[in-house]
Image (tube, grey):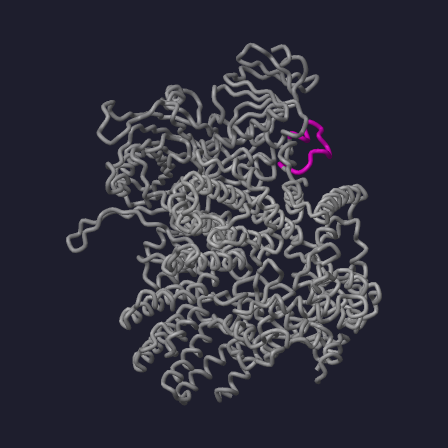
């Protein structure tokens, strides 16, 4: 399949080497004010960068030991992880920490040098709202299907899904469904591609994809593709590379990724690259960042772009990693 | 006064009209020595906003048609009787009013706004929303379907067409097709559809190519704000494009803005203030008596009416005679009581309360006049009249009967906008005059630049700013400015305006 | 680390700019260092609060600093007592505010009492007088006092009441200050989750600490803000979610509210009239209708009339904007209402099959009529397909040959107009036997 999916004439090809260098040098920009303004995303940033490197076939481009040290330095006594040392623990950074340790095959370091796997699971499980089944991001209580997915993702990777009320959580996801087949941040909220991914992937982890109205959702998701080939997040909005992941992974999970024009999407993602200095941006010609770089690469991976490692559409990790941890095909 | 003559000025500017003032703003960070004089005791020249007292003396100077060359002529006024009617406040003190001599709305996409922003002058201005554009529909006395005269909002957005209950569904589609065409008229696909007919009347084009019925054509043509009503396809599409793309640009529900406290006059004053902050010297009530050129030095010797002669390297003045007039407008300004609330209603969720509204009488909708009449209504929020009153600025193309034509329009309009529970609107004060527009080019003669007379259009014409930019460039060249002139009207905030610190 | 819509520049920082950055980084780290030091020492006072203000103005995404800020507020500036807790005998130490400590809270109540002087008339930010809320609040507080009240002297009771009032008035000031602190930040970063979160926290404090009427007034003003954010960006996801959340709380018993479904429904109508493409408004409408009809106790006839009005509204909308997918999604919603007999899914659950058929057929006619003026709009063909399938579903049958003929034609147009989704059209053809 991959052989037919080369870039269209005129589009650049994937600038793998430039992207690798771009990611490698992200942590050398400490004299840039912006580097510090984004510290609240540091651990997530490491996950975005490392996952992209794995998919680009360069898993060793960041030093493994340093990465593990950094991850562990973000852990709190309660088991949760903050975005960086000195930052409070939060679901989002905790999920990134788990994904990083799993990807680096270093979960056992939690026992030897960290607070232990059980405590991580406990931190996450404590954030479940036992009445509604959904999850909060931290002790301050913001609830969102993003956190529910994050919890499912991390707990299942750690083999601790039984710490939470899966059925209640599943019912909560089902209550977020809209007439158009999509899902929102919570019950009553408008369908949004990012939220759809979190809901569909959570259902996939729970083995409950039977709850999804596949045709309706597939139809809605396929309409996210706009004439330039890129995907948007909601009707009448602008395209953005990150939806190459949110929309396409959802389509892939429900078996409908052939409902969009895959070659046009490849072209769009490739046009968003900074082929010289590396990195991918939201739209052609804009500033690159590691977040869009990852989701450009994962999008290309799902599209079978040659030379990329396959990505797991549910976990946003290399399929090799999830196969090692979860088994299966 | 000695300091005026001590050294040579770089620029002497005569008149504080909008163009001269924008020029001063453009030069306000140049370090050039600028003397700015105006024969009037107020700012704004032909763009001024006058108190009733100022209007008295202005009227004297412009009442005849043979008082020498002037942009303005045939001025006349009238006041309502002194005795007050019940429920009416009557005319307040003359200082409570500022009547704009040439009021112009500013479309949101006008380059004037982007330049006011980039020059930071906008920080001293307060902008108000221009709300609905209405069209006047005459009443009908037909026995089968008698109908009172009324105003209809011109639907110019998809949402307004959607909300309109008077247009038939199929006609709505035709109108939408045309509006979409306007938005995209410059595309490769659409150019061939209209360029061969660019000079034809827009009205004909609407009928032949879009099958718009007479009502819809009147809507569209009216929206061009063309004083004569016979705008060409080319100009019409450009003006409509500006209108449509301006709608919603700064927020829901409005396409244009109006600066509070007198429109262009207020912009002129803010621009002059920026000039003064930059070091320009101001003298009001001071005219230029004569100008001589020293052939040896190329410098100008300018004798002022204060009996002082100053030296300057350049002189900028405005065309105040309307030489080679190209267009003209007859205006009637009316102070009206009560406040005409029905014109200033909010119609779109989340939009600001409008302070200005436009009403058009299409050609032929009033007896005896072959030109359209436009009425620009200002609420007291503009600061131009006391609360409880409004000001109506009527205009049409001059003719021997234009004064009575405008009065007919005013008389027809007032009953159609009366609000139940309030007394019927009546004019308390009116001022009539005619205004000419000279040749639109900038003239350069030795060290003297003459700016064209102000444009009489109802919406600010960006061409005005092009002239200012051209004048600015010429001055730099004449003064040997060279490289450091920077970008036109792009300035940093002056100290104190920046607060972005930890 | 995530940037949207910012143009890529090849511009390289000059040495001067790099130095300027270093100075800014130095200042930022200095602030951060001071804050961390104070947090480590457990000093959660107004000076620490001030540090959080400065840091958050520089970086509103710094969630840890928001957390510190809330800890400072609960332990130093907000009073120790809460409305909910005044009835219970134990001092408040509720689990949802992990850092609230009763000792520091008590010590801070003295300055708070002097600030909240009850003599001065007070006006809220929007000119709403908070004083008007004092009546019911005071009586509520008095009525809710413990049984021990009977043993206290009248002076003691009055003093206790004054203290309680001073405490909530002071809390109201703190909450108002928090709400206004976040406004400029929100204007700069309308999509920053943490700012919205902080507002939700501040509002929850209002519910917990202020008398009901005063709390309600605070929440009602919040609707104004949500409206303002939505007029700046009609599709702002956060603002719509926030509005929904504020409304749900205003409707709840803690704020003594009733249903706002009618008002919110009218709000969506206004938003739609301002922008037909606002799918967020159409979506919200779809959510409100079932509740609205239930609350109205609408009869079957009233339900039918309601449906007809929605169909007319939509047909008027697609008449001027057939290229707008928001409208066609809402059309899908209306079709679902026509097909379903489930009370949760349909506004007309008891409609006869023949009536359903007639409505759908009228839709087909209306949409076909659009083709007279609009030929190349794929949504029209998709809607026609949808209608044909709905018709079969309502009549509980397979699509018949005549319908298949038309569907084949429409599908042909879809494949021609929308080749990007060819894979989908192939599946549709196979599924309905249209190959």
Residue C179 coordinates in the image, percent (x, y)? 53, 46
Pick the quarter of the image with the C terminus of chain B.
top right
Horizontal relation, residue C141 to residue C192: left or right: left
- Residue sticking out furthest to the left: B143
Q: Residue at x 57, y 54 (%)?
A: C93
Residue A267 coordinates in the image, percent (x, y)? 67, 69
Q: Magenta segment: does it hold B485?
A: yes
Q: What stretch is highlighted in magenta?
A: B475-489
Residue A200 coordinates in the image, percent (x, y)? 58, 74
Residue B200 in view in this figure: no
Q: Which residue is drawn at 34% across and 29% down?
A: B432
Q: Residue at x 68, y 67 (%)?
A: A95
Query: Image quarter for residue C353?
Result: bottom left
Whether residue A93 is situated above or below residue C365 in the rendered picture: above
- Residue sticking out furthest to the front: C151
Horizontal relation, residue C306 to residue B277: left or right: left
Q: Magenta segment: does it hold B84?
A: no
Horizontal relation, residue A203 to residue B262: left or right: right
**Which residue is at the front of the view, A19 or A141?**
A141
How many numbered marks, from 0 up?
0
Query: Image quarter for residue A78?
Result: bottom right
Whether residue C435 is situated above or below residue C62 in the rendered picture: below
Whether residue A304 is situated above or below residue C282 in the rendered picture: below
**Which residue is at the front of the view, A20 or C66?**
C66
**Which residue is at the front of the view, C351 or C5?**
C351
Residue C7 in view in this figure: yes
**Which residue is at the front of the view, B125 or C412?**
B125
Residue B167 coordinates in the image, percent (x, y)? 32, 58
Pick the quarter of the image with the N terminus of chain B.
top right
């Amino acid at each position: 399949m991959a052989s037919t999916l080369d870039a269209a004439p005129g589009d650049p090809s994937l600038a793998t080497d430039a992207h690798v260098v771009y990611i490698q040098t992200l942590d050398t920009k400490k004299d840039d004010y912006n580097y510090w303004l984004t510290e609240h995303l540091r651990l997530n940033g490491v996950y975005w960068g490392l996952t992209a490197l794995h998919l680009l076939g360069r898993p060793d481009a960041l030093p493994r030991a340093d990465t593990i040290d950094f991850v562990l330095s973000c852990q709190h006594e309660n088991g949760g992880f903050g975005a960086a040392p000195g930052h409070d623990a939060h679901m989002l950074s905790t999920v990134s920490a788990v994904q990083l340790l799993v990807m680096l095959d270093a979960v056992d370091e939690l026992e030897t040098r960290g607070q232990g796997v059980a405590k991580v699971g406990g931190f996450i499980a404590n954030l479940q709202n036992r009445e509604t089944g959904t999850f909060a991001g931290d002790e301050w209580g913001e609830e969102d299907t993003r956190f529910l997915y994050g919890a499912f993702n991390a707990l299942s990777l750690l083999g601790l899904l039984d710490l939470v009320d899966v059925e209640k959580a599943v019912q909560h996801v089902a209550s977020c469904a809209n007439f158009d087949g999509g899902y929102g941040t919570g019950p009553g909220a408008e369908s949004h591609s990012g939220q759809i991914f979190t809901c569909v992937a959570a259902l996939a982890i729970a083995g409950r994809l039977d709850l999804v109205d596949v045709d309706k959702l597939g139809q809605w998701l396929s309409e996210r593709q706009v004439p330039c080939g890129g995907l948007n997040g909601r009707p009448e909005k602008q395209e953005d590379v990150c939806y190459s992941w949110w929309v396409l992974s959802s389509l892939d999970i429900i078996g409908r990724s052939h409902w969009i024009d895959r070659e046009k999407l490849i072209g769009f993602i490739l046009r968003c690259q900074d082929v010289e200095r590396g990195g991918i941006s939201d739209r052609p010609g804009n500033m690159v960042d590691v977040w869009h770089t990852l989701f450009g690469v994962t999008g290309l991976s799902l599209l079978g772009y040659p030379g990329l490692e396959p990505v797991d559409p549910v976990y946003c990790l290399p399929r090799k990693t999830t196969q090692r941890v979860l088994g299966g095909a | 006064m000695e300091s005026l003559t001590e050294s040579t000025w770089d620029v002497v500017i005569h008149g504080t009209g909008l163009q001269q003032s924008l020029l001063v703003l453009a030069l306000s960070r140049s370090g050039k020595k600028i003397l700015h004089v105006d024969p009037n005791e107020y700012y704004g020249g032909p763009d001024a906003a006058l108190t009733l007292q100022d209007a008295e003396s202005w009227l004297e100077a412009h009442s005849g048609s043979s008082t020498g060359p002037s942009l303005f002529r045939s001025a006349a006024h009238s006041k309502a009787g002194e005795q007050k009617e019940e429920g009416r406040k009557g005319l307040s003190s003359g200082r409570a009013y500022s009547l704009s001599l040439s009021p112009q709305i500013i479309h949101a996409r006008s380059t004037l706004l982007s330049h006011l922003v980039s020059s930071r002058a906008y920080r001293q201005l307060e902008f108000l929303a221009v709300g609905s554009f209405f069209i006047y529909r005459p009443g009908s006395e037909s026995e089968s379907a008698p109908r009172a005269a009324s105003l209809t909002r011109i639907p110019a957005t998809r949402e307004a067409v959607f909300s309109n209950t008077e247009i038939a569904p199929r006609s709505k589609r035709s109108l939408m097709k045309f509006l979409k065409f306007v938005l995209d008229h410059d595309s490769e696909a659409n150019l061939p559809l209209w360029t061969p007919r660019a000079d034809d009347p827009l009205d004909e084009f609407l009928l032949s190519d879009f099958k718009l019925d007479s009502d819809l054509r009147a809507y569209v043509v009216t929206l061009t704000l063309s004083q004569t009503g016979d705008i060409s396809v080319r100009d019409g599409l450009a003006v409509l494009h500006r209108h449509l793309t301006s709608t919603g640009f700064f927020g829901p529900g409005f396409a244009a803005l109006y600066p509070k406290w007198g429109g262009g006059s207020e912009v002129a004053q803010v621009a002059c203030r920026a000039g003064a902050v930059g070091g320009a010297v101001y003298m009001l009530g001071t005219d230029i008596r004569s100008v001589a050129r020293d052939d040896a030095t190329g410098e100008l010797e300018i004798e002022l009416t204060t009996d002082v002669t100053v030296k300057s390297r350049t002189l900028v003045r405005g065309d105040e005679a309307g030489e080679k007039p190209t267009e003209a407008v007859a205006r009637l300004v009316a102070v009206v009581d009560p406040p005409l609330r029905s014109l200033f209603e909010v119609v779109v969720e989340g939009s600001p309360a409008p302070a200005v509204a436009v009403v058009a009488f299409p050609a032929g909708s009033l007896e005896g006049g072959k030109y359209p009449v436009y009425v620009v209504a200002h609420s007291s929020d503009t600061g131009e009249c006391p609360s409880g009153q409004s000001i109506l600025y009527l205009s049409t193309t001059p003719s021997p009967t234009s004064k009575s034509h405008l009065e007919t329009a005013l008389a027809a309009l007032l009953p159609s906008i009366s609000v139940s529970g309030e007394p019927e609107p009546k004019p308390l004060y009116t001022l009539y005059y005619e205004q000419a527009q000279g040749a639109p080019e900038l003239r350069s003669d030795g060290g003297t630049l003459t700016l064209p007379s102000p444009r009489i259009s109802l919406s600010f014409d960006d061409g005005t700013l092009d002239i200012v930019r051209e004048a600015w460039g010429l001055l730099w060249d004449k003064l040997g400015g060279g490289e450091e002139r920077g970008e036109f009207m792009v300035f940093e905030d002056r100290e104190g305006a920046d607060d972005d610190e930890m | 680390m995530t940037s949207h819509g910012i143009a890529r520049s090849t511009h390289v920082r000059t040495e001067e700019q790099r130095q300027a950055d270093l100075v800014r980084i130095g200042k930022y780290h200095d602030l951060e260092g001071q804050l961390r030091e104070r947090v480590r020492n457990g000093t959660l006072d107004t000076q620490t609060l001030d540090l959080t203000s400065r840091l958050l103005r520089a970086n509103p995404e710094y969630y840890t600093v928001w957390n510190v800020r809330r800890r400072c507020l609960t332990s130093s500036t907000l009073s120790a007592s809460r409305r909910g807790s005044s009835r219970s005998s134990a001092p408040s130490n509720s689990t949802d505010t992990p850092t609230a400590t009763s000792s520091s809270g008590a010590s801070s109540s003295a300055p708070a009492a002097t600030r909240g002087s009850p003599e001065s008339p007070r006006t809220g930010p929007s000119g709403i007088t908070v004083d008007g809320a004092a009546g019911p609040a005071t009586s509520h507080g008095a009525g809710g006092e413990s049984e021990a009240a009977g043993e206290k002297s009248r002076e003691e009771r009055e003093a206790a009441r004054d203290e309680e009032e001073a405490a909530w008035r002071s809390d109201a000031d703190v909450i108002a200050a928090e709400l206004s602190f976040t406004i400029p930040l929100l204007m700069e970063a309308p999509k920053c989750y943490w700012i919205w979160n902080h507002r939700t926290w501040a509002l929850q404090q209002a519910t917990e600490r202020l008398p009901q009427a005063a709390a309600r007034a605070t929440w009602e003003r919040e609707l104004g803000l949500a409206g303002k954010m939505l007029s700046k960006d009609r599709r702002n996801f956060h603002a719509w979610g926030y509005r929904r959340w504020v409304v749900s709380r205003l409707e709840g018993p803690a704020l003594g509210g009733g249903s706002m479904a009618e008002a919110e429904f009218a709000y969506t109508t206004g938003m739609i009239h301002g922008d037909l493409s606002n799918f967020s408004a159409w979506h919200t409408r779809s959510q409100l209708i079932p509740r609205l009809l239930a609350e109205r106790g609408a009869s079957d006839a009233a339900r039918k009339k309601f449906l007809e009005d929605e169909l007319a509204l939509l047909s008027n909308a697609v008449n001027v904007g057939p290229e707008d997918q928001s409208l066609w999604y809402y059309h899908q919603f209306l079709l679902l209402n026509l097909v379903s007999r489930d009370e949760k899914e349909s506004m007309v659950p008891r409609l006869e099959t023949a009536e359903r058929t007639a409505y759908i057929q009228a839709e087909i006619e209306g949409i076909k009529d659009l083709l007279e003026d609009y030929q190349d709009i794929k949504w029209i063909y998709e809607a026609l397909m949808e209608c044909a399938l709905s018709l079969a579903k309502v009549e509980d049958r397979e699509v018949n040959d005549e319908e298949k003929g038309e569907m084949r034609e429409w599908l042909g147009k879809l494949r021609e107009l929308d080749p990007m989704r060819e894979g989908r059209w192939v599946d549709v053809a196979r599924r309905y036997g249209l190959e």
